[in-house]
Image: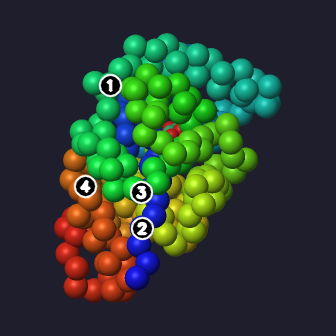
Amino acid sequence: MESIKAAIFDLDGVIVDTAKYHYLAWKRLADELGIDFTLEDNERLKGVSRMKSLEIILEIGKQSFKSEDKEAMAEKKNKWYREYIEKMDESELLKGAKKFIEALKGADTKVVLGSASKNAMSILNKIEIIHYFDEVIDGTRVKNAKPDPEVFLLGASSVGVKPENCVVFEDAEAGIEAAHRAGMLAVGVGESETLKNSDFRVSGLDEMSLEKFNLLFKFKESDKKGINIGNKI
Ligand code: BG6
Ligand code: MG
C-alpha cells in the first residue's frame, strides 16, 4: 500500500503567525497612499507574492503606478516588515507546529517548506526550526507564485518523492489550489471560509498527530468514504 512520504508546509499562517506583521507593513504603505486597507482586505493577500499583494492593494485604492514605482513600494513594505519580524523568536511559533514537525521527523517522513516568502529562511532561523527541514523552497526559488503548483512540485522532487505521496499544509486558498494542481492532498489550517476546498481541515497544527497524518492517506485511498478525520469542511 502507498503511504505518505513527505509533508510540505506553508510558513506564514501555518507554522508562524506573521500575517499580523505583513498587515501592519502593508497598512503603513496603504496609509501613505491614502488607501483604506482593512483586515478583511488582508485575507486576499494570504499566500500570494509580494508584488501581487501590492497590486491587490492598489486595485482596492483604484491607483496605478509604473513598475519601477511599484518595485520601490514593495521594497519599502519589505523593509518595514523585516523590522517587525526582526524581534521574532520561538514564542511566535503557532501552537502545535514544532511538536508535529518533530513527530514527523521521528517517523522518517520528509519535511519540506513550500512558501511564497522571500523571507522564509531568515524566519526559520529566528524561530530555530530550520534544522527540521529536509528542503526549503521559498519565494527566491520559484518563478510562478501560488496558485501555480511550482513551489510544491519542486519541493517534492527535491526530496525525491512523487507528488501523490505528499501532503500539503496550507492556510490560504491559493495554496490549497496549488497543492491540488500539483496532485497532492491538501490540509487546510485555520478557521477561514477560504479553506472550503481543502481535503481536510484543522484549526491549527496542534490538532494534528502522527496517527491522524497516516489516516489522511487511508482516507484518500478509500475515496473519501467512511474514515472520520474530524473537522472536514
Ligand atoms: C506568503 C504570505 O507566505 O508570502 C503573503 O502569505 C506574502 O502574505 C508572501 O505576501 C510573500 O512574502 P515576502 O516575505 O516575500 O514578502
Ligand atoms: Mg500562508
Image quadrant where one finds the C terminus: bottom left
Image quadrant where one finds the N terminus: bottom left
- In the rendered structure, are the residues bearing label 3 and label 2 in contact, judged by CB atoms less than 8 Å apart? yes
The circle on residue 73 is none
Residue positioned 28% across, 71% down in the render: 215
For marks 4 and 2, the one nearer the N-term is: 2
The circle on residue 90 is 1
The quadrant where ligand 1 appears is top right
Mark 3 to mark 2 CA distance (whole Å):
8 Å
Q: Is residue 1 above or below residue 134?
A: below
Residue positioned 75% across, 23% down in the render: 69
**SS at badge 3:** loop
- Mark 1 residue type: Glu
Mark 3 to mark 4 CA distance (whole Å):
15 Å
Mark 1 to mark 2 CA distance (whole Å):
28 Å
The circle on residue 4 is 2
- Mark 4 residue type: Met
